[in-house]
């Protein structure tokens, strides 16, 4: 194994996402000091990390970083070269926490927040040295999904480049945003898809289980290797995206006009919950998460093989 990109990382907030990051860092030989204000977080972290490390071993990652649970935030940050913050998604909480991390972390350490939606300019406003604080947004489960979205002070800032180098040394695929936006790139795209899935149910076109089934049997099969722009380039036939716009732009614009944002009132929300819980009653969330990870592992192995075969 190549040299790890840091000797020690701090993981602040050791819930679901903190556990995934911890496992990834450990499997690359990075020592991790985790901290969480909830005393119950430690056993849950250890269990999640053990299971994630098994997955990573299947991908050939055998690194043996050491996991410690720190008693204080200060202890977790001692000697850390990279800090990954994974506290609850609340702006005031993250703003205060990042300021505290920035005050305590060694000079030169990069501080990355896993925030799914918050703006970097907002959550770094109380930091003494905001330049070293970036958003490093993973996708669940962070130990398996390759993508990390990065928002730094500028795309070519030193901290942005160092965060890119760090995550890429862990095998991640990074996308640096040119500017900040609530939800970054992919949660905005996810929100658009989710809004329409909810709206289609509200309009009575199909039930949640059928909408999920249609996605899995249809467009999701191309998503591992085709993004939306490539999809429409191919959808235009020989003429590519140019012909697609000539032929289908008016129809697309009509569809966009007919896509309302659904009203999520109490009654409709209860209807969604009832329908989803009924359709998913045969297996627990934990069983489904394990199943997801088994399938993701298989997909990642296939993806690696297909990527090797890709034309230059
Ligand atoms: N769950 C996802 O799918 C997902 C995906 C990508 C990013 N994220 C982001 O990761 C972050 C964490 O989400 P999660 O799903 O792991 O949540 P979680 O609830 O599983 O974990 C949050 C942890 O933070 C701890 N915590 C509470 N107050 C804290 C404080 N002041 N300082 C440090 N830790 C504190 C909690 O005890 C808990 O263990 C959020 O910013 C979220 O937006 C979540």
Image: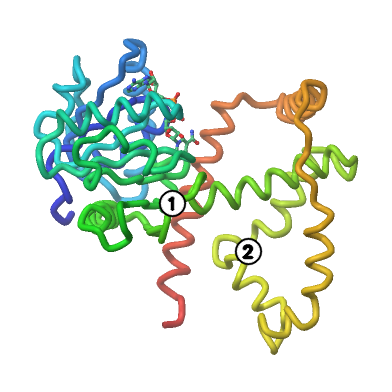
The residue at the far bottom in this view is 238
| Residue lying at 63% horizontally and 64% vertically, measured from the top left | 222
Seen in the picture, residue 60 relative to 82 is either above or below; the reply is below
Image quadrant holding the C terminus, namely bottom left
What residue is pinned by disc 2?
Answer: 222
Residue drawn 90% across and 40% down?
Answer: 204
Q: Classify mark 1: helix, strand or loop.
A: loop
Residue at 43% x, 26% y is 88
**Residue at point 31% right, 33% down?**
85
| Residue 79 image offset from top left, x and y in percent | 9, 34
Residue 110 spot, x, y in % from top left: 20, 44
Q: Disc 2 on helix, strand or loop?
A: loop
Query: 10 Å neighbourhood of mark 1: few (<14), some, or many (≥20)?
Result: many
Q: Is residue 272 left or right of residue 10?
A: right
Disc number placed over residue 180 in the picture, else none? 1
Q: Position of residue 111 (x, y in %)?
A: 24, 40
Q: Please, is residue 72 above or below residue 246 in the view?
A: above
Q: Foreground residue, 187 or 40?
A: 187
Q: In which quarter of the image is residue 98?
A: top left
The label nearer to you, 2 versus 1, is: 1
> How far separated are the C-alphas under marks 2 and 1?
28 Å
> Where does the N terminus fall, quadrant-wise?
bottom left
Query: Is 87 placed above or below 249 here?
Result: above
The numbered mark, 2 or 1, whose residue comes first in the sequence reads 1
Residue 64 to residue 257: above or below: above
Quarter of the displayed picture in which ligand 1 can be seen: top left
């Amino acid at each position: 194994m190549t040299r790890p990109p840091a000797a020690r990382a701090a993981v602040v907030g050791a819930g679901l996402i903190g556990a995934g990051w911890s496992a990834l860092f450990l499997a690359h030989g990075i020592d991790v000091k985790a901290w969480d204000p909830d005393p119950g977080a430690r056993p849950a972290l250890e269990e999640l990390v053990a299971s994630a490390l098994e997955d990573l071993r299947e991908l050939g990652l055998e690194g043996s970083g050491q996991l410690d649970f720190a008693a204080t935030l200060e202890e977790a940050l001692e000697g850390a070269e990279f800090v990954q913050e994974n506290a609850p998604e609340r702006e005031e909480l993250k703003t205060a926490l990042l300021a505290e991390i920035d005050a305590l972390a060694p000079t030169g350490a990069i501080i990355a927040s896993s925030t799914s939606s918050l703006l970097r300019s907002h959550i770094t406003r109380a930091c003494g040295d905001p330049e070293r604080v970036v958003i490093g947004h993973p996708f669940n489960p962070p130990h398996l999904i390759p993508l990390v979205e990065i928002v730094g002070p500028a795309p070519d800032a030193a901290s942005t480049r160092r965060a890119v180098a760090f995550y890429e040394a862990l095998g991640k695929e990074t996308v640096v945003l040119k500017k900040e936006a609530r939800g970054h790139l992919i949660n905005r795209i996810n929100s658009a898809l989710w809004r329409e899935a909810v709206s289609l149910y509200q309009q009575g076109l199909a039930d949640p289980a059928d909408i999920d089934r249609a996605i899995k049997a249809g467009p999701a099969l191309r998503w591992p290797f085709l993004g939306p722009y490539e999809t429409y380039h191919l959808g235009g036939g020989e003429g590519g995206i140019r012909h697609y716009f000539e032929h289908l732009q008016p129809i697309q614009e009509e569809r966009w006009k007919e896509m309302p944002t659904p009203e999520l009132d109490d009654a409709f929300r209860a209807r969604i919950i009832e329908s989803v819980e009924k359709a998913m009653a045969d297996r627990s969330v934990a069983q489904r998460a394990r199943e997801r990870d088994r399938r993701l592992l298989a997909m990642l192995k296939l993806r690696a093989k297909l990527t090797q075969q890709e034309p230059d």
